[in-house]
Image: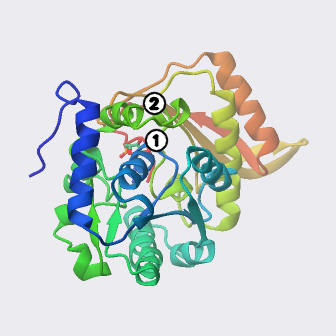
Amino acid sequence: MIEEISIEDLNPEEFVKEKVDEISSIVGDGLSINALSGGVDSSVVTMLGHKALGDRLKTYFIENGLMRRDEPQQVVSLFADIGVHVELIDAREQFFNALKGITDPEEKREAITQTFYRDVFGRLVRESEAKFLLQGTILTDVDETVAGIKRQHNVFAQLGIDPEEAFGYQIIEPLVQIRKDGVRKVAEACGLPESVCNRMPFPGPALSARVIGEVTPEKIELVREATAITEEELADVDAFLKLAILHDDRVTGIRDGRRDFGLQIEIRCWDSVDARIAEPTRLPPETLDRLAGRIVTDVPGVVSVTYNVTPKPPSTMEPI
Ligand code: XMP
């Protein structure tokens, strides 16, 4: 049973000190690796790990081919500015091969998990001779996995899986007692820039969680374009999460006066504090009009754009 540290009880500076000590004592004089996605959770873990271990922590950005536009290069250069070297690992082929032919949501998540933890991290651990992986699992990830809602890509012990046995390394999870709102406070205490502290969440399975049906490089490119437009058009909207989904079903549309059995994009925008419950943001109609107009013009083959109006629960935020 994990003991939650509520937002009221969290002292971010104390938390940083405690976790740095904890990481130092677990890793001893050994080596650890961690994967940075640029999200607030993995960014905080990167900072805690570097404070504890210095260059005995090797930080990687895994380019899985499923990230948002320009994200890999932006994250590497932002951390270079902070003084943290991040090595970019090209694993695009591995992830697309693993996802080939899979349509079931939980099987997709399992393929992503195995590719990250067994194939990519397994190799990085062997090559670097590290014994530990530091990762930013938070309490909400554990809750939803244990409740059987969706298998978050980064939860093992609570499912009775021993990472040492399964993958050959131990996992250290310094953030597992807190939730997103707590992580943002700790991010500030670590001195991370505002853009990271308040960064929108992005799921471990990345854009593959936003393609219904089989994931292919072509479909990822479509959802990547729709995501970029959505984030641009909603940049001034203060919401917890903004996302675009590519549906598998086609619908009849009209293009240039002719029938076009085209693609559907769904937009979701969420108000939430800690991701446990959420409400769709009441976006102004003009904003929705502009968003839909750009998506049908700029994303090839799209003839329908819809906006989700269902709260979580019964919806979840990501569609997969
Ligand atoms: P859901 O879809 O479960 O999303 O309502 C709640 C929050 O969790 C994020 N999310 C994930 N984060 N690994 C993660 O690190 C995952 O597998 C994952 N799935 C969902 C989601 O973006 C939202 O912020």
- Mark 1 belongs to which amino acid? Pro
What residue appears at the point 62 percent right and 71 percent down from the top-left corner?
92
- Mark 2 belongs to which amino acid? Phe
Q: Is residue 177 above or below residue 289?
A: below
Left/right of residue 302 with respect to residue 110 in the rendered view:
right
Which mark is first along the chain, 2 or 1? 1
Q: Is residue 10 above or below residue 236?
A: below
**Where is residue 176 shown, x and y percent of the image?**
24, 49
Most distant residue in the left direction:
1
Residue named by callout 2: 240
Q: Is residue 52 above or below residue 3?
A: below
Q: Are marks 1 and 2 in contact (CB under 8 Å)?
A: yes
Viewer-nearest residue: 267 or 198: 198
Q: CA distance from mark 1 to mark 2?
A: 8 Å
Asked if the residue at label 2 sits under 8 Å from ligand 1, the reply is: yes
Viewer-nearest residue: 82 or 268: 82
Q: Residues within 10 Å of mark 1 (few under 14, many from 20)?
A: some
Count of numbered circles on the image:
2
Left/right of residue 29 with respect to residue 120 in the rendered view:
left
Q: Report helix, strand or loop for mark 2.
A: loop
Residue named by callout 1: 201
Q: Report helix, strand or loop for mark 1.
A: loop
What residue appears at the point 70 percent right and 64 percent down from the top-left corner?
218
Q: Is residue 251 above or below residue 178?
A: below
**Where is residue 124 shown, x and y percent of the image?**
46, 77
What residue appears at the point 18 percent right and 61 percent down from the top-left corner?
158
